[in-house]
Image: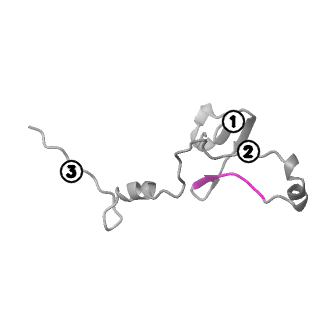
Amino acid sequence: MNDVPRIHCGEDVTRGSHSIVSKDPELIIPLRIKCIFSAFKKRKLTSEEMSERDEVEIIHLSADDKTLDPHCESYADNEDGFLDFRGDLKYPPPAKKK
């Protein structure tokens, strides 16, 4: 996944910039900025596609990691650990030099 928006790629911008790129099968899904998030266009399957779903190519975009638990709260807990009760970033106190 190339998550840097094209506008920030400068002269290094390519067709695969700000895209999800897969080599097998070869596929480039261009991302767009929606508010502050990267997203791609999607749509529901049509009734015809649903009835012929065996003929529709399915591409899984999730990690092939058996340990991934999308319902795990630890990511949110770790992120919250950066904030104090006011929602401000907590910075570690500077180390004292001897």
Regarding mark 3 in the picture, which secondary structure is present there?
loop
Residue type at the position of mark 2: Ile
Say which amino acid is labelled 1: Ser
* Image coords of residue 6 (percent x, y): 62, 42
Q: Is residue 22 left or right of residue 83?
A: right
Q: Closer to us: mark 1 or mark 3?
A: 1
**Residue 13 x/y as whole percent:** 64, 35
Residue drawn at x 20%, y 47% as measured from the top left? 94
Question: Residue 71, how many percent across, how many down?
Answer: 52, 58
Amino acid at the residue labelled 3: Pro
Of tags 1 and 2, which is closer to the observer? 2
Query: Which is nearer the eye, 11 or 53?
Result: 53
Mark in front: 2 vs 3: 2
Distance, label 2 to label 3, CA atoms, is 47 Å
- Please tell me how crowded label 1 is: few (under 14), some (14-19), or many (20+) other residues with Cα within 10 Å: few
Residue position for label 1: 22
Res. 81 image quadrant: bottom left
Asked whether residue 63 is drawn in magenta, I would say: no
Which of the pair 5/92 is nearer the observer? 92
- Give the residue pinned by disc 3: 93
Q: Residues within 10 Å of mark 2 (few under 14, many from 20)?
A: few
Alpha-carbon distance for marks 1 and 3? Answer: 43 Å
Q: Which quadrant of the figure has residue 83? A: bottom left
**Looking at the picture, how far across and down is residue 21, in whole percent?**
67, 37
Dot 2 lies on which element?
loop
Q: Which residues are magenta?
A: 37-43
> Which residue is under mark 2?
59
CB under 8 Å between discs 1 and 2: yes
On the rendered structure, is 86 left or right of 53?
A: left
